[in-house]
Image (spheres, rainbow, N blue to C red):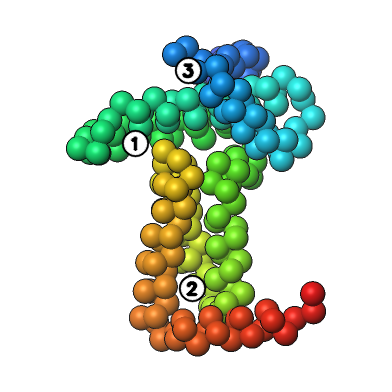
Amino acid sequence: MKKVLFAAILSLLTLTAVAQDVALKTEGQDSAYVETIKARAQKIVDGLGLADAQKSENVRNIIANRYFLLNDIHAKYDKSQQDARDAELYKHHFELASALSLYLTEEQIDAVKDGMTFGRLKRDYQATQDMIPSLSEYEKKQVLIWLREAREYAMDAADSKGKHFWFDKYRGRTNNWLSARGYDLKKERENWMKRTAASPK
């Protein structure tokens, strides 16, 4: 009986949370910046193809609020305070996925993360496979694991340069690892370029 009651209460709390509208947290933000961020978040939401208008707005506001939060955190610290900045970023890192989980599936949350990081994960993963078609399933999995790590760091970066930095950093790690496993990356890249040039347009 207690288990049934607990389940009912949990279900009610979940439904209540979902039913609540998510407000934009624009206090202290420049109005032009707010409009820019709303448009950026809306573009990501449009890619999800959500049919429910209220759900779409809530998801957009969650994403926009994330951008506002990141902007505030990065503006608070200078270069000499990177440890404090990183600690605060980590403190809030998991809030985005948690908030989105009330409205989106895991696949859709992944799509939001890709939208916030310029789709680098999918592009870099595909490029690595195209460059080295002989990668084993184990090697492909490891490459994907590192790209996912890069995406998590990139999501908290201050700007586009910072986001690309993390993917480039992890690409270096991946290349070093593949080289250590016997791949001649220079030769693999040259062969890839030849295949690309020879393929029909």
Could you tell me residue 131's position as x and y percent?
Answer: 57, 77
Describe residue 180's horizontal placement relative to residue 190 as left or right: left
Question: Are the residues tagged 2 and 1 within 8 Å (C-beta)?
Answer: no
Mark 2: amino acid: Glu
Q: CA distance from mark 3 to mark 2?
A: 44 Å
Which residue in the structure is indicated by mark 2? 139
Mark 3: amino acid: Gln
Q: Residue 86, relative to residue 17: is it above or below?
A: below
Q: Quadrant of residue 137?
A: bottom right
Describe residue 182's horizontal placement relative to residue 14 as left or right: left
Mark 1: amino acid: Tyr
Which residue in the structure is indicated by mark 1? 90
Q: Nearer the viewer, residue 36 or 179?
A: 36
Could you tell me residue 33's position as x and y percent?
Answer: 53, 24
Q: Quadrant of the C terminus?
A: bottom right
**Label drawn at residue 29:** 3
Other residues around mark 1 within 10 Å, as few (<14) / some (14–19) / many (≥20): few
SS assignment at label 3: loop
Describe residue 120's horizontal placement relative to residue 71 as left or right: right
Could you tell me residue 156's position as x and y percent?
Answer: 42, 39
Answer with mark 2 or mark 1, whichever residue precedes in sequence.
Answer: 1
Comparing labels 3 and 1, the label whose residue is closer to the camera: 3
Answer with mark 3 or mark 2, whichever residue precedes in sequence.
Answer: 3
Other residues around mark 3 within 10 Å, as few (<14) / some (14–19) / many (≥20): few
Q: Quadrant of residue 87?
A: top left
Could you tell me residue 139's position as x and y percent?
Answer: 48, 73
Question: Are the residues tagged 3 and 2 within 8 Å (C-beta)?
Answer: no
Other residues around mark 2 within 10 Å, as few (<14) / some (14–19) / many (≥20): some
Q: CA distance from mark 2 to mark 1?
A: 29 Å
